[in-house]
């Protein structure tokens, strides 16, 4: 069945205009001032509404160990939140795993996805060996050209500079995207021990043990290695002005660098880590929430193009589990917050409604730039020949965010009680309406693997 969206205001990253859209066989076939429906066409009237390209969230953690959302529940939550494609951060390799075995196992895990998907493959220090580099060629043939590295979490995920150099050099030859979690793990580990030894165990010390300088130092180092190896680097979840300034400097030098931030860093600040009765545990993530002055810098980064993507970094960890860890000390609190379901509307409200960014900036960081960076050529804009991935939003409707009504399989949301002006009415994925008036109507397993 073909779908026609009539009377809506189409919003792309570089232009906005009123027009009708026709989707045939999952592809946008026509954009015109007026499209007359034929007998079997399905029609959605988008009068007084905004029509966006489907959002792409390139930083989710579905089916990760200890997290509540798998690909079914996680992608349902993503869909009702306006996301039509995700790129998932898979868990790191298990002992004696090869990259290809790891990929095949995660393809099996993702069978239930209701939206289109791909993966980032984590290469950790403990799992790295010379065979890893050889396997990257095979991984590329499987459709994966994104790898993630960590400069923190020593003994678990952290790679040293030599390993990073060798991995980035090979990645540069293969035109891979190298995503990096940039914090100085050695300094953090020592700082954590110092605070605990001095009885400073509350959640706020999670932030104090990971100050902006350790993020900025690692970011500068990662960008330098990318420059030497001529590789494409994507710094995930940039939180502070010091780190963002390092990205700005590198881009001016010609480094092929991209910066991502997350919704929580634009909206929430360090004060949430001082909430009483362990409520603060809800807001523990790494890097930590920063100051309001950092938020101003991040919004500016979106407007001037230094920040290319706003993701969710969705981590479905129950508050009950975070609170239990916090009863001992801040280092035991599982890191991460849920957000894939709320990313689109929270960013729209605090970004567009509060005049921090334009409508076109909004589309750029939630859809167009992620598609461009990660090679999703059929996604990212409303234009003829692209996939029929659309989000229709009523800017006059309001919504109060509540964990009682969410699809995310967690017992809280960091945005509880926030009133949003603007609500999603319809989501279309490859020409199929999968969300209608907030209700998920798609089929389990309909998502395609994005090559």
Image (cartoon, rainbow, N blue to C red):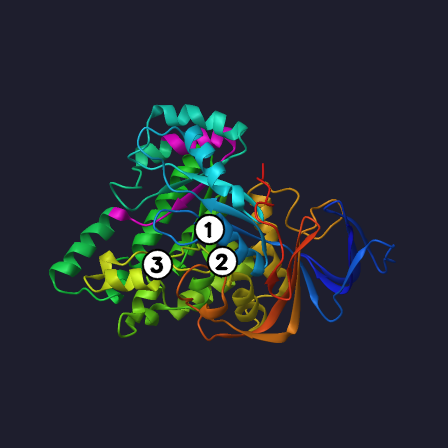
The image shows residue 417 at horizontal and vertical percentages of 46, 75
Q: Residues within 10 Å of mark 2 (few under 14, many from 20)?
A: many
Name the image quarter holding residue 45. Answer: bottom right
The image shows residue 41 at horizontal and vertical percentages of 81, 54
Q: Residues within 10 Å of mark 3 (few under 14, many from 20)?
A: some
Dot 3 or dot 2: first in sequence order is: 3
Q: Which residue is mark 1?
A: 60
Quote the CA–CA distance across marks 1 and 2.
7 Å
Dot 1 or dot 3: first in sequence order is: 1
Please determine whether, in this image, residue 370 is positioned above or below residue 94: below
User: Which span is picked out in magenta?
Assistant: 166-185
Quote the CA–CA distance across marks 3 and 2.
15 Å
Q: Residues within 10 Å of mark 1 (few under 14, many from 20)?
A: many
Dot 1 or dot 2: first in sequence order is: 1
Q: Which residue is mark 3?
A: 285
Residue contact at pointers 1 and 2, CB within 8 angstroms: yes
The image shows residue 124 at horizontal and vertical percentages of 33, 37
Q: Which residue is mark 2?
A: 340
Judging from the image, what secondary structure is the residue with disc 3 in? Answer: loop
Judging from the image, what secondary structure is the residue with disc 2 in? Answer: loop
Q: Is residue 344 visible?
A: yes
Image quarter where the C terminus lies is top right
Residue 34, magenta (yes or no): no
- On screen, residue 375 versus residue 266, left or right, reads right
Q: Looking at the image, which residue is at 75% across and 65% down?
A: 8
Residue 177, magenta (yes or no): yes
């Amino acid at each position: 069945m073909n779908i026609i969206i009539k009377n809506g205001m189409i919003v792309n990253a570089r232009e906005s205009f009123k027009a009708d859209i026709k989707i045939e066989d999952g592809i946008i076939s026509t954009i015109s001032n007026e499209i007359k429906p034929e007998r079997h066409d399905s029609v959605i009237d988008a009068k007084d509404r905004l029509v966006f390209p489907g959002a792409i969230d390139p930083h989710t953690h579905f089916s990760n160990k200890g997290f509540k959302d798998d690909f079914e529940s996680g992608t349902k939550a993503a869909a009702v939140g306006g996301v039509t494609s995700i790129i998932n951060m898979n868990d790191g390799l298990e002992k004696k795993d090869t990259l290809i075995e790891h990929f095949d196992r995660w393809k099996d895990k993702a069978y239930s996805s209701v939206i289109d998907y791909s993966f980032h493959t984590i290469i950790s220090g403990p799992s790295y060996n010379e065979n890893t580099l050889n396997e990257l060629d095979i991984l590329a043939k499987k459709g994966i050209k994104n790898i993630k590295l960590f400069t923190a979490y020593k003994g678990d995920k952290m790679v040293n500079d030599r390993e990073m150099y060798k991995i980035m050099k090979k990645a540069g030859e293969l035109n891979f995207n190298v995503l990096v979690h940039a914090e100085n793990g050695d300094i953090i580990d020592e700082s954590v021990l110092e605070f605990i030894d001095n009885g400073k165990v509350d959640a706020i010390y999670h932030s104090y043990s990971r100050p902006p300088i350790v993020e900025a130092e690692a970011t500068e180092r990662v960008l330098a290695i990318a420059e030497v190896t001529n590789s494409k680097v994507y710094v995930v979840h940039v939180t502070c002005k010091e780190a963002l300034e390092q990205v700005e400097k590198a881009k001016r030098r010609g480094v092929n660098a991209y910066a991502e931030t997350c919704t929580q860093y634009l909206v929430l600040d360090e004060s949430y880590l001082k909430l009483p009765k362990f409520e603060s545990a809800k807001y523990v993530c790494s890097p930590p929430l920063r100051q309001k002055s950092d938020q101003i810098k991040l919004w500016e980064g979106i407007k001037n193009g230094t920040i290319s993507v706003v993701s969710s970094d969705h981590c479905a960890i129950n508050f009950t589990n975070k609170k239990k860890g916090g009863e001992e000390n801040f280092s035991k609190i599982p890191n991460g917050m849920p957000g894939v379901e709320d990313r689109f509307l929270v960013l729209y409200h605090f970004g567009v409604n509060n005049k921090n960014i334009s409508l076109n900036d909004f589309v750029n960081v939630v859809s167009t730039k992620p598609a461009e960076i990660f090679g999703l050529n059929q996604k990212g804009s409303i234009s003829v020949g692209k996939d029929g991935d659309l989000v229709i939003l009523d800017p006059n409707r309001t919504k109060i965010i509540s964990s009682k009504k969410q699809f995310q399989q967690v017992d809280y949301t960091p945005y509880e009680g926030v009133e949003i002006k603007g609500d999603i009415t319809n989501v279309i994925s490859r020409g199929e309406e999968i969300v209608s008036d907030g209700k998920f109507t798609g089929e389990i397993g309909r998502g395609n693997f994005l090559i």
